[in-house]
Amino acid sequence: MILMHIDSGNKAAAVCRVAGQIGETVKPIGYKELNRTLLSLHTGKAVTKEIKLPPLYQMPELLVFIGMPEARLDQFLDAYKAAGIEPVALKAVATLHNSNWTVFELIEALKAERAGFETHK
């Protein structure tokens, strides 16, 4: 399963087409899922945590890969690149370490990690 937040309808449709080509499902997510855990979005059980969003919070583009074997993830990424789809700001693989994080917690961790890489260039 791929959790996806992409505002552009054309780009979102392209991601869905690529996922469909490899037999993977896409679940669109938005602001109402920011307090849901990755595991709960995968299982369908409504597990939430209390979060406090910063004022005027803007949710970035995001793809989260859940329960995908490495070979299928590689296949998706190759097909994504071959389709010429613009890159997504943040991408992550759900792991045992982050599966109980909320979508918001994951986004903030990815942003911090990205900022760390950019300062070390």
Image (cartoon, grey):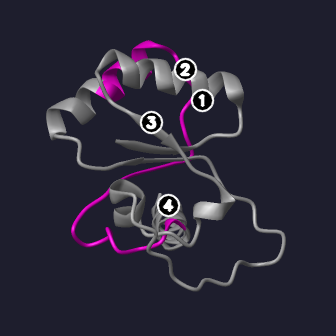
In terms of depth relative to the viewer, which is nearer, 52 or 83?
52
Which residue is at 39% across, 25% downward? 19
Task: Look at the numbered discs 1 and 3 and tell me whether their residues touch, using CB distance below 8 Å.
Answer: no
Q: Which residue is mark 3?
A: 26
Task: Look at the numbered discs 4 and 1 and tell me whether their residues touch, using CB distance below 8 Å.
Answer: no
Which residues are the magenta region?
76-103
Q: Is residue 41 left or right of residue 72?
A: right
Q: Which residue is mark 2?
A: 14
Q: Is residue 38 left or right of residue 116?
A: left
Cα separation, mark 3 vs mark 2, equals 11 Å
Residue 114's tag is 4
Magenta region includes residue 91: yes
Q: Which residue is mark 1?
A: 12
The answer to whether residue 68 is above or below residue 112 is: above
Residue density around tag 3, few if under 14, some if 14–19, many if 20 or more, within 10 Å:
some
Cα separation, mark 1 vs mark 2, equals 5 Å
Kindly report which numbered mark, 4 or 1, lies closer to the viewer in this rendering.
1
In terms of depth relative to the viewer, which is nearer, 90 or 64?
64
Which amino acid lies under the numbered mark 2 shown in the image of this protein?
Answer: Ala
Kindly report which numbered mark, 3 or 4, lies closer to the viewer in this rendering.
3
Of the two numbered discs 3 and 2 on the same chain, state the one appearing first in sequence. 2
